[in-house]
Amino acid sequence: MPIISRFFGIVVTINYREHDPPHFHAWYSGREATINIRDGAVKGDLPKRVVGLLLEWLDMHRSELAENWQRARVGEALKSVDPLE
């Protein structure tokens, strides 16, 4: 799983050749969730504070995440996405 960003103890990945809908995975303290790039729907088990940070980050980087999603679908190298500061 390629790591595309890390911030505040959160690790964000996008898998290669993943299933639709476009999404990324987030890991925090042994817990995981998937976040839909288009609408921000969250599936998983992350603390509310972490989900809030991820949704803020998603809003700032939605186009970069969508581009990485397309790159992953065709097996291209993914680009790092700036962390939330």
Image: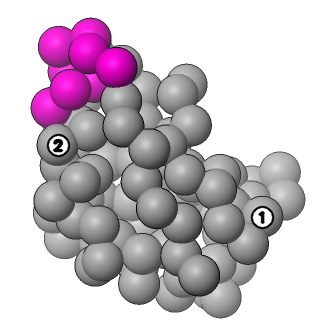
Compare residues 63 and 53 and report the one nearer the observer.
63
Q: Which residue is mark 2?
A: 67
Amino acid at the residue labelled 2: Glu
- Separation (CA) of disc 1 from disc 2: 24 Å
* Rendered image coloring scheme: one colour
Q: Which residue is mark 1?
A: 9
Compare residues 79 and 1 and report the one nearer the observer.
79
- What numbered label is drawn on residue 84? none
State left or right for residue 5 relative to residue 21: right
Quadrant in which the N terminus appears? top right
Compare marks 1 and 2 and give the one earlier in the sequence.
1
| Percent x, y of residue 40 | 29, 71
State left or right for residue 63 relative to residue 31: left
Q: Which segment is the magenta one? A: 70-77
| Percent x, y of residue 44 | 56, 59
- Label 2 neighbourhood size at 10 Å, few (<14), some (14-19), many (20+)? few
Q: Quadrant of residue 71?
A: top left
Amino acid at the residue labelled 1: Gly
Which secondary structure lies at badge 1? Answer: loop
Determine the residue positioned at 26% across, 15% down.
76
Quadrant in which the C terminus appears? bottom right
Which secondary structure lies at badge 2? Answer: helix
**69 up-or-down from 47: above or below:** above
**17 up-or-down from 56: above or below:** above
